[in-house]
Image (cartoon, rainbow, N blue to C red):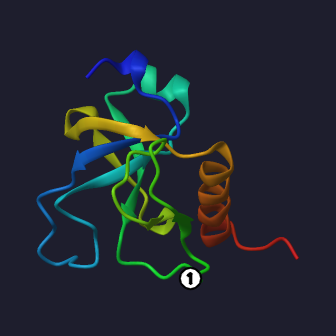
Amino acid sequence: MNSATIRRGQVYLADLNPPHAVHKNEPSKIRPVVIASIDDFNQSAATVIVFPISKSVYPDDSTIVYVRHSAQNGLDYDGGILPFLVRGISKGRLQKQLGWVTQSQIDEAVEKLNLAVAGSED
């Protein structure tokens, strides 16, 4: 995988196996992910930070970013970006680029992760 071509917001099929035996809530198998790490990191590191995408979501779930399938993102189903299941993976686990999510979708996913980690400033 050419690191120069891996960009924030791209959707890839990624191998998230093997699942951890004691952590069955972690996403596994080959599934779409969106690249969450910034481009400078993606070019220099051996890993990337990703948000898994799942089709087992509800559009009104406030913890996900709903994504409709489109030619732009390459998904063949409506689903959701799962920012709270963020993980770092080796670039070798990225199998095929499918497309892109919108800038507003990646921004919303990062904001939801920030809220989960840092909480509200109110």
User: x and y percent of residue 112 in the render?
Assistant: 63, 66
In which quadrant will I find the C terminus? bottom right
In the rendered image of this protein, does residue 87 appear above or below residue 2? below
- Specify the quadrant that holds the N terminus: top left
Q: Nearer the viewer, residue 8 or 77?
A: 77
In the picture provided, is 99 more to the left or to the right than 30? right
Tell me if mark 1 has few (under 14), some (14-19) or many (20+) residues whose alpha carbon lies within 10 angstroms of its own.
Answer: few
Which residue is located at x 38 percent, y 45 percent?
74
Q: Amino acid at mark 1?
A: Asp
Q: Which residue is mark 1?
A: 61
What is the secondary structure assignment of the residue under circle 1? Answer: loop
Q: Residue at x 44, y 44 (%)?
A: 71
The answer to whether residue 34 is above or below residue 39 is below
Q: Nearer the viewer, residue 2 or 98?
A: 98
Across and down, in percent, residue 72 comes to: 49, 41
Q: Residue at x 35, y 77 (%)?
A: 56
Horizontal side of 51 relative to 65 (left or right) equals left
